Image (tube, rainbow, N blue to C red):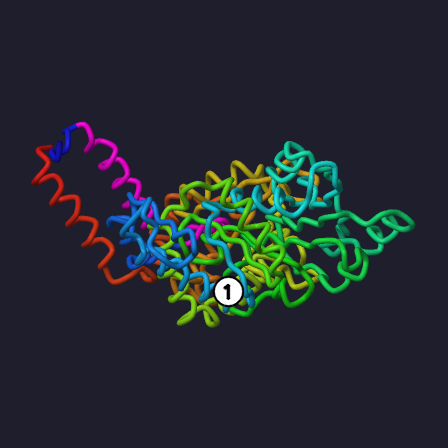
Amino acid sequence: MTRTPSDAFTPLRQAAAHHEAARHRLHLVPSENGLSLAARIPHLMEAAVRYAFPGSDGGGENWAWPGRQDLVAIERAAAVRLGAQMGARHVNLKPVSGVSALTVALSALARPGEVAFNWAERDGGHGSTRFIGTRLGLRMKDLPIDPASWTLDLAALAHRLAGGPQPELVYLDAFMCLFPVDLPGLREVVGSDTVIHYDASHTLGLIAGGAWQNPLVEGADSLGGSTHKTYPGPHKGLLATNDAGLAARLDEHASHFVSHHHPADVVALAVAAAEMDAHGAAYALATVANARRLGAALAERGFTVCGEKGGFTDCHQLWIDIAPLMAAEDASRRLFEAGIVVNAIPLPHITAPAGLRLGVQEVSWAGMGEAAMDELADIFTDVLRDGREPSALAARTRALAEAHQPEGADERVLHTALAALEAGGGA
């Protein structure tokens, strides 16, 4: 049973080919990031195939799943470290993704029949929030958005709520974001009894690095989200709060919505959290600086970059209304042929069906700076504005990518593992 069948090597070789091609591209998708070799290694360990649950008293051995205390200890230490980064006393690492965290939060923080406001999808809210909230029996309503400032219209919200009951929950789920939310102002509008939950999927790494608003300091009751966007961790999720009562509710609902929360991912997240303690502040500041530099450079070259009056962005995202030049899908294809990966996606408050959504967090984590942003802007200009053949720019893109890659340890480990498997597996 240990011999690897020959046809098992087909998907491995396909994935290896994808891996090799992706290494020579620049990835500017706001919902992705790099993952260090150290954080990838746990998926080769026993943690990848084991459950890990604490004992019933929270401390002793769990004799239904014995021999997992070391994995439980890793999770607890990771929760403490992440809590320090977020300013949270209670952290739950059960969610396996951002949508998993979203589901738990909606279930735990409001009851069926209660009113929950969230960011409408047309304004940049997550596409799953309304569906999941409605299926859970919540009465979902749109938060009003000011298209001039690209964020909440608190005056309009106050007018809407005047004289009536306040909502039980405000779920801030903007996966399309450029600028922070006025959380103190929101708290003043909705009052002290409304629970404000901040979905930090996109900005978690910037919060941890001190380059974005800290929701739990500024008025949110809880936060949650994924750990692989601006936070350079594995595909996983978390929930955090300073309210012991909310923490108990989140823990209870998480224990039912998530039966097994993937210990290898927990270990990988613990590694990423240590890396963020070491490098997170510099990385987060560089990410914001790079996004603003790229936005300004593209605007100077004639591109329509959203949010110009506010400095284009305060986070990792940039939005380009590319319709004056071509359809967003054509722009994405041309950039891909030049070695650059971007989102062609509907953008809030533009007339075209879609625009380009860029994120600089992955290239910033790789060590790129403002000079690289200028080079990127030049490549965009050549490919999208001046009509140069995309393949003619691929060498420039590849040179930029290769100049900011690890020193080869990742590839040696991969090639050694594949070679050893094939030598022993009988392919």
**Quarter of the figure with the N terminus:** top left
- Residue segment shown in magenta: 7-33
The residue pinned by badge 1 equals 83
Percent x, y of residue 179: 65, 59
Q: Nearer the viewer, residue 195 or 379?
A: 195
Q: Is residue 153 left or right of residue 365?
A: right
Query: Is 327 above or below relative to 164?
Result: above
12 inside magenta stretch: yes
Q: Is residue 220 left or right of residue 160?
A: left
Query: Is 133 above or below relative to 402?
Result: above
179 inside magenta stretch: no
Q: Residue at x 48, y 71 (%)?
A: 281
Label 1 CA crowd tier, 10 Å (few <14, some 14–19, many 20+): many
Q: Nearer the viewer, residue 65 or 337?
A: 65
Q: Nearer the viewer, residue 13 or 310?
A: 13
| Prevailing secondary structure class for the magenta stretch in the rendered image | helix
Percent x, y of residue 107: 62, 42
Percent x, y of residue 112: 70, 37
Query: Is 171 above or below relative to 283?
Result: above
**Residue 356 in view of the camera:** no
